[in-house]
Amino acid sequence: MDHNQYIEQYLELDDDQLSAQQRLSISSHVANCRECQVLLTVEHATRTMLKENVCVIPAPDALRRQIAASLDAIDHTESKRIPHRIVNRPRLWVAIVSLAACMALIVFNLRTHSFDNPVFDGAIASYVASQRQFVPTLGTKSTDDLAIAMINQFGVPLVWDFSSAGLTSRGGRIDKMRDGTVVAYSLYEGTSGSLLCIIGRREGFRFPPGDQVVKGIHLYRYKGYSIAATDRYSVFCVMISDLPVAELARAFNRLPA
Amino acid sequence: MTATKPEKRRLFEQEAMPHLDSLFTAALYLTRNREEANDLCQETVLRAYRSFHQFTAGTNCRAWLLTILHNLFRSSRSRARPEHLSATSEDFERAIESESLKTSDSFANPEAIVVERNFDRLVQKALQDLPTDFKAALILVDLEDMTYKDAAGVLEVPIGTVRSRVSRGRALLRVALRFFAGERRLAGVES
């Protein structure tokens, strides 16, 4: 071993990776070697310098709020998915109630979707977060201006008009994801509910066939939300809303062909 | 670990959330970008929450979270286009040398040098500019006080690799600081 290797091993003595004999051998070499002493001093000094000059950076409050909102969304979706367990003594009426509950669950699952879709889950999390806070970055509530922003970003004027469902635009924002992809959000609100529209490039976007398809837009009831998904031109679009699916279907039906 | 929903959330907030600052610091040094650090941090926490049932109570939660963070960072880096960052220690030394001799946003401009006169800023920049593998090892061992064994677990590399990355990383850090210090002296700024 050279001196550097001795020092590397010596610094690892506390790690419990070496035998007692190895520890003794390394310790005695370092204790009696002038060159190792110098190297050891430099290593310690470098570590101390790092610890003293690089401190822990507090996570921003905005990040904490965003995380809390996302955790709420996960709790919300999971609590809807997992039925409450009935723990009681086995009596006949419990069995009957359980059977009825199972039947209701089966019917419910037939009417809704029991699949898990990470894209939809992510979209729901974004929707829930938007209900707590939505900061438009496009600086406009006009759908025309939103369309221009979409053209600049994606090359297509993919903006929806939900005025027939009583929803008006609250503005849009364009975010850059960690992998460099760009996603646009536009929020629509009305007295009866709200809708978040998420648009991005189509690569890798997959969605299952919808319960209902209106003008190429697939509609779903998923984990308590109404979802519409479509991919057209070179982009995908996922819309999440607390409005009933039928309301969305009516709004899409009223769109020009 | 099994827990009802509110209990799961309470336990998660108790066990994992105190480490958020550590996660954010690591994310910031790894990505060198505040927005990316935010995303990486958030994704780490959400993934940890979804798989919290896999966490064994009483074990090292910070190491578990950092493992998730480093895994996510590695997969995002493998998807991303090659960056201008130095990939190897040799690249780094060359880059530092050329930076000290020619131009650099932070260090070539005398006014910037005055701004950067604080030694802690120099150390932080030197750490930030290290090749990722060395930087990750130094963050875990020197800043997070992890054992070589735990760091090897987080980085999913053999312990010998961690040992050599820590040693080489510290050496590179000294090289960078020598260059920066030399440059500051040239600019007439106290070192």
Image (spheres, rainbow, N blue to C red):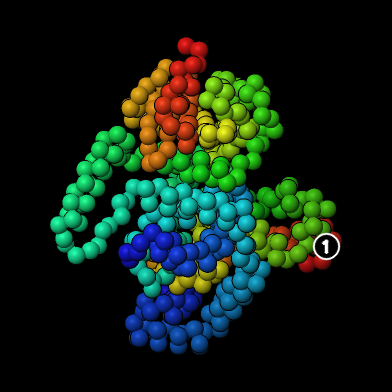
User: What amino acid is found at the position of numbered circle 1 in the picture?
Assistant: Val
Which quadrant would residue B170 be assigned to in this image? bottom right
Side (left or right) of B78 relative to B31: left
Q: Give the number of marks.
A: 1
* Closer to the camera in the image, B77 or B57: B57
**A178 up-or-down from A64: above or below:** above
Does the image show residue B129?
no
> Quick one: quadrant of the N terminus of chain A?
bottom left
Residue at 47% from the left image edge and 71% from the top image edge = B146
Q: Secondary structure at mark 1?
A: loop
Identify which residue is drawn at 18% across, 56% down. Answer: A93
Q: Is residue B13 left or right of residue B1?
A: right
Give the letter of the chain under mark 1.
B
- In the rendered image, the vertical position of residue B83 relative to residue A202, given as above or below: below
Q: Which residue is mark 1?
A: B189
Front-most of A95 and A251? A95
Give residue A139's quadrant in the image. Answer: top right
Q: Nearer the viewer, residue A6 or B15?
A: B15
Q: Determine the residue located farthest toward the front in the rendered image.
A: A93
Residue B173 point in image, percent of width and height: 61, 63
Foreground pick, A113 / A203 = A113
Regarding residue A163, the answer to whether it shows in the image is yes
Residue A199 appears at what percent x and percent y? 51, 30
Left or right of B30 on screen, residue A21: left
Residue A169, placed above or below residue A79: above
Badge 1, how many Cα within 10 Å: few under 14, some, many 20+? some
